[in-house]
Amino acid sequence: MRLSHRLASLAVALVALAVALGACNGSGNENTPTPPPDPHALLTDAIDKLASASSFVIEISVSGLPVKIKVGDITLPEEIPVYFEYARGTFVAPDRLQAAIDIKVADAVARTELVALGNDQYMRSDLLTQGNWVQEEVIDGFSPADLLAPETGIPSALARVRNLELVGRTDLDGVPVHHLAGTIDAQDVYSLTFGLIGIRDGEVNLDIYLLTDGNWVEQIVMEEPLPAEAEEGAEPTRWQINVLDYNQEITITAPEFGDQDGNE
Amino acid sequence: MNDGMPGATRGHSPWLILLIVCLPVFIGALDLTIISAVLPEVILSLNLPVKEYLDQASWAVSGYLLAYAISMTFTGRLSDLIGRRAVYIACLIVFMLGSYLVTAYDSALVNGWIARFYNVVLGQRPPRLEERHLYLVITGRIIQALGAGAMVPVTLALVGDMFPPARRAKPLGLVGAVDTLGWVLGHLYGGVMVRFFGQNGDRLVEAAQRIGLGISKPSWETLFILNIPVSLVALVAAWWVLKSVPQQRTAGRFDLIGTLLIALALIGLNVGLGTSPEAATSATSLEELKQAGTGRNIYFLLAGLAAFGLFVWVERRVAVPLIRLGMFRSRNFASAAFTNLLVGYCLAIGLVSAPLLVNFRVDTPTSDQIQEAAYVAGLLLSGLTVPMALAAMPGGWLSDRLGYRWPTAVGLLAAMAGFILTGTLWDVQTSYWMMGAHMALIGIGLGLTISPISTAALNDVHEDERGIASGLILNLRLIGMTVAISSLTIYSLNRFDTLVAQYQGSGADDRVQTAVNASMSAAMKVINEMQLIGAGAALAAFAAALFLRGGRSTPAPAPAMPQQRMTRRPASSPRGPDD
């Protein structure tokens, strides 16, 4: 009995403490609830920060229906389809990019390293170039400057998001973020996916996560509509783009590919 | 423990009990190598590039090996203190839990926890999802191994509880054979099953649907799921039969410091040398072999050596050491230990070279071809390991009649001959039958050494040290394998680079084709040279085996003196009639 009395007293004391603390927190702003932030203002701030970043790391992963790609003019021994799996690249303004791209050739995932300096692209892959650096236009017509280009870059693509709304403040694996949602024309998504997204017409749903601490773009998630020829039961391609490590001091130079094979 | 009550079981035959407790030992040993033949398949199924992740993925094998070796060092002693049944059952549950975790790598909940842990606790970006999947597979494997390895010394100790001293050789041999058979069959079992699942998976799903069961297509994960029902049956049976084994607990202290130091030494050695003898058997190129085997960190190696030095210092001073170092002053034990170290070295070369050559022959990296290569590699490896396990029996028979020395020496000469054949005759066109025949010669040779080496070592130590001595001998073989992979990788890569440059210099116009041809020729030559080094190691082991003596008849067992372990004492060395 004594123990139960003590426990009851403790419970009452804890409830009283909680009420008191609640009252303290609530005092002064009971009648003035904080209005939710304006999603357009949040996104504009995030776009400005992205556009003016001296560097950032971008990480792209896909799930669902595989994304078929063409790897420059490199010919494979057989008609083997090549699919995009994952990429992680460091962009240094205004026009340098170093990336590791995982592609699936047949059933094997192989890593291709890419260095793009302006309009020059270099690549190296064990599977495709026997580990030697070669100068090759891996992504047709791509220049890293496209990532931030005024009309086609990521900031301008984000600026064209329609039906933007604030879903709320949430938690992305322990990181507090603002969750925005909207739609975007498929053709505007080019820069977000290095031109890999399969459709050019229609709209794509977009979820944007901005860090509550500073409004930096943290993650963008897009779901590509299924193409008409997709098999029954196929899941739509889901793109997840993470942007991280803004404004780090990074230098990207051309690979010394002359030393790799001794023949250059 | 219990030496005063040999054969004291209430109601169940000791042999029945032994067979039941050996089942999980077999599965645990099977899992030691089960994944090595299918490691590329595992990495592919996780959607990771094989080359970049083989290094990390090899921890699914080497982490198991390391945890297995570490848990073998101390759980026998732990079971002395808190009881065999409790420790055995706990180990089996840990093994089952680990098996489940391996298959639950894609759990959204667990992956979310990991991401949250990185973000909130470490303040770092979490690894990409596929990497987290890999880390969960590795974690599950390590947990599995902590349970599996621990069951070996506990089972050996149970033999001591259930059988009188004069009748322990056969049951001890059975435990050793079950453990060896498990890991020698793991490659084949893994390769065959994954190929079977690849070819018949859809039909199995349809058949299950017909009887109302909704299952997903079986894959490498199924190998681990299968562990759970089998272990569950063994768990219930062991729980029941072990009740009849008297549970006497030894008074005394557990050498925690010694245990931690030997664990640190093993971790330092393995990480420092970059142990992956089993993962190395999955390498499809010398570059991947490098990732599976080159030294990762000299500081780990130095830390491991320092921990080992401290371990020796501590063991010489404590009243009840984990390992009584005086064992190494006995001629047979020392000779057997050194010979087994070199046997491990030879074995690693035999296990690595055939899969490396098979994988070199894969033209297109389709899942089918990789599964086929894993299957062929598994078959070839069984060409070495099955004869090795089978030869263990005539090895024991010969040891009884001729003594320890000559079966071991003859076996090592046969292995040397096998390595010379592989080193001089193998090329990219060699048929798998021919390769299998050469591998079988190596396997028979190494197999002949198992029984005489183990018996020589066990009969040269006190009876109550047999559990720890068995674990030590097994561990030395694993260390020999580790050292082999590490040292040969460094050698072979340097040699490979030199040879590629040499061959490319005389190349034709087609740059890519020249590079491919040069790599192939260089790799083949390096594999041949590795095998000739194996012949040299077999010769060195032969020389060490010549120091063995005795063994023609069963020596009288040393008196069991469990209480005397509380104080230091000189080693007893029962000798055979030769001495």
Image (tube, coloured by chain):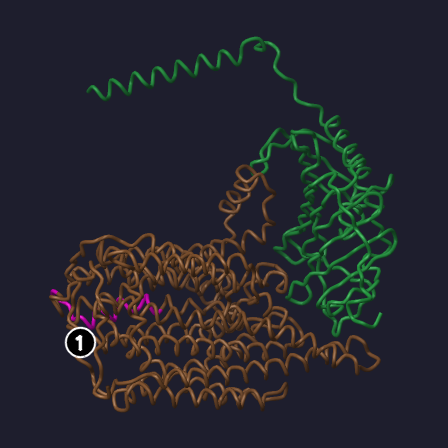
Chain colours: A green, B brown
Q: Residue at x 23, y 76 (%)?
A: B573
The residue singled out by tag 1 in the image is B557
- Magenta residues span B10-26
Return the x and y of residue B214 as percentages of the image width and height: 46, 58
Instruction: Name the image quarter holding the N terminus of chain B.
Output: bottom left
Return the x and y of residue B557 as percentages of the image width and height: 17, 76
* Residue A209 seen by the camera: yes
Residue B311 in which image quadrant: bottom left
Q: Residue under mark 1: which chain is it in?
A: B
Residue B193 higher or lower than B109, as above or below: below
Q: Is residue B343 left or right of residue B232?
A: right
Q: Residue at x 60, y 76 (%)?
A: B359
Return the x and y of residue B184 as percentages of the image width and height: 41, 76
* Residue B214 seen by the camera: no
Residue B285 in which image quadrant: bottom right
Residue B18 magenta-highlighted: yes
Instruction: Name the image quarter holding the C terminus of chain B.
Output: bottom left
Q: Is residue B125 left or right of residue B257?
A: right
Question: Predominant secondary structure in magenta?
Answer: helix
Return the x and y of residue A179 as percentages of the image width and height: 65, 33
How many C-alpha atoms fall within 10 Å of the one at disc 1: few (<14), some, or many (≥20)? Answer: some
Which of the pair B135/B290 is nearer the observer?
A: B290
Which amino acid, mark 1?
A: Pro
Q: Is residue B179 left or right of residue A190?
A: left
Q: Residue at x 38, y 68 (%)?
A: B475
Residue B24 magenta-highlighted: yes
Tag 1, which secondary structure?
A: loop
Which of the pair B452/A151 is nearer the observer?
A: B452
